[in-house]
Amino acid sequence: MISMLQLVSTSGLKIASAAAGYAPIPALVPAIDLLCGIIELCENVSHNQNTARTLIERCDRLVVLINEGKLNTPKKIEEQVALLYSCLSGIKFRLKKVIDKGWLERFAKQKDIALAIEACHTEISICLEQLQVTSHLMIHSWQREFAESAKKDHDELLEKLADIEVSQKLSEAEARKQTELMKQMMGMMQQLLGENKQAAERRHQGISSNLYQFQKQSGLLLPKFQLDSGEVKRTSDHPVGTTSSGMDIYEGIYLGCEKVAIKVVRSVNANDASNKRFNREVDIWCSLWERDQGRHIVPFYGYNTSDGPYPYMVSPWHEQGHALAFVQKYDKLVNYHDLIEGIARGIEILHTMQPPIVHGDLQATNIFISDEGKPLLADFGLSKIVAEINGVPLTQSRGISSSYRWMAPELCTGEAIMSTSSDIYSFAMTVLELMTHQQPYANIKRTTEVVLKIYEGKLPERPNNWNAMRRGLTDEMWELLTACWAAEPKNRPSIQEVLNRLS
């Protein structure tokens, strides 16, 4: 007798019509209905087709053997049918839970579908044991077939993710509504990147491109921040710049689509300690991104502690460069008040997080300018990370660097504990820097002399040139700056008070 599966595939009939033409023994009719439902569910599987096919074939084969009385079992036909019905009911219920979903959920949960199909095979084996079938081949041969089918499904999935513009099926609005599914989808794709990092460049590029589109549509960062699966590639052999904290900056390409800055932290070795410390920052980076979405803070895309002797961090590249270069280039076009208020808004984001985030290295070269001309705070908290990994106070890890010109007095001695108040002090020095186009204490060449002045409580001299006044260094602004430079941290205004005075 022809099987139900053969009837569907060879006749071209729909499942319901094929079932009507099938002629089982009367007691098997309810089981045939269940088999039809299982076939229909498996036809809706778009990315686990091979493993789904092996399951259908095994269910179908069991039905045919019982229908033709060829199952080698001592059980009576009524018992066979009852056990078969119970088995197929369980299989249909299990499949419906994972397959009867939208395309995105089915795509994102392919692993769950594969596990469900494998569990269904186990249910059939249990049914055969209950039927007292003695054929070892019937009970256990499915495992080899399932493994081969799963391998085919995996290879086909890689091809689809690499070749098909999967991301085009999803609108940005839909992507942002389904945050958890997008996280699962992106996590799966990022894992597959690692598998194809070396072996298949074309696949790697295709998956990277689609993963990037998913990231942009969903507004999410990658689930795994340790970028060791080929997410980032350097495109410059030598550093193109250096940050105030001593990081070498290289150009790179992110997911094959976006130019990024790769910041190599030379003062820290790439080891388990640095990996654990960077991992602790992941929740902070994610929380900041969820709140700010890159409006005031340069996001971190991730880090790598396994590509060379030093760890590095990855951030978007900004063609406009840092704030000091920007105001020097476009002096008469810059709205200095809006620029300073934008910087203060970024600090407000950091200081009002729970717990508050201290930037720790505010100065114009750590503030980048977006394509829209807005200021973006970069490298927040990095000074603290480096100090903790090295196990030395900030003052010792920095040496006598020019960054002392922006530092609050309490950071120049002792344990150098950073706080939101020390950020306020540095903010005021940054405002002075932008207004004058020069570093603080520009009239003093040696940094050691500057440190002594700060320790003695001597403030920078007020500029009297017309350009500084034109840019906004009025009496009111100078009063605000001197308030921010109060020797006692508790006497400095909060960032909210600063914003109130600016507005």
Image: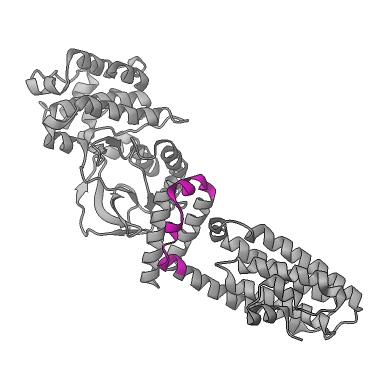
Name the side, left or right, on which 136 lies relative to 475.
Answer: right
**Colour treatment of the image:** one colour
Residue at 54% from the left image edge and 75% from the top image edge: 152
Residue at 50% from the left image edge and 59% from the top image edge: 188
Question: In the rendered structure, which segment of residues is drawn in magenta?
Answer: 160-180
Position in image of residue 75 (x %, y %) = 90, 78
Vertical side of 9 occupied by 346: above or below: above
Dividing the image into 4 quarters, which one contains the C terminus? top left
Q: 360 or 177: which is nearer to us?
A: 177
Residue 167 part of the magenta segment: yes
Dividing the image into 4 quarters, which one contains the N terminus? bottom right
Vertical side of 448 occupied by 491: above or below: above
Position in image of residue 455 (x %, y %) = 24, 22
Vertical side of 110 occupied by 291: above or below: above
Residue at 59% from the left image edge and 76% from the top image edge: 149
Position in image of residue 205 (x %, y %) = 36, 65
Examine the rendering and report whether any part of residue 416 can be seen: no
By secondary structure, the bulk of the magenta-drawn segment is best described as: helix
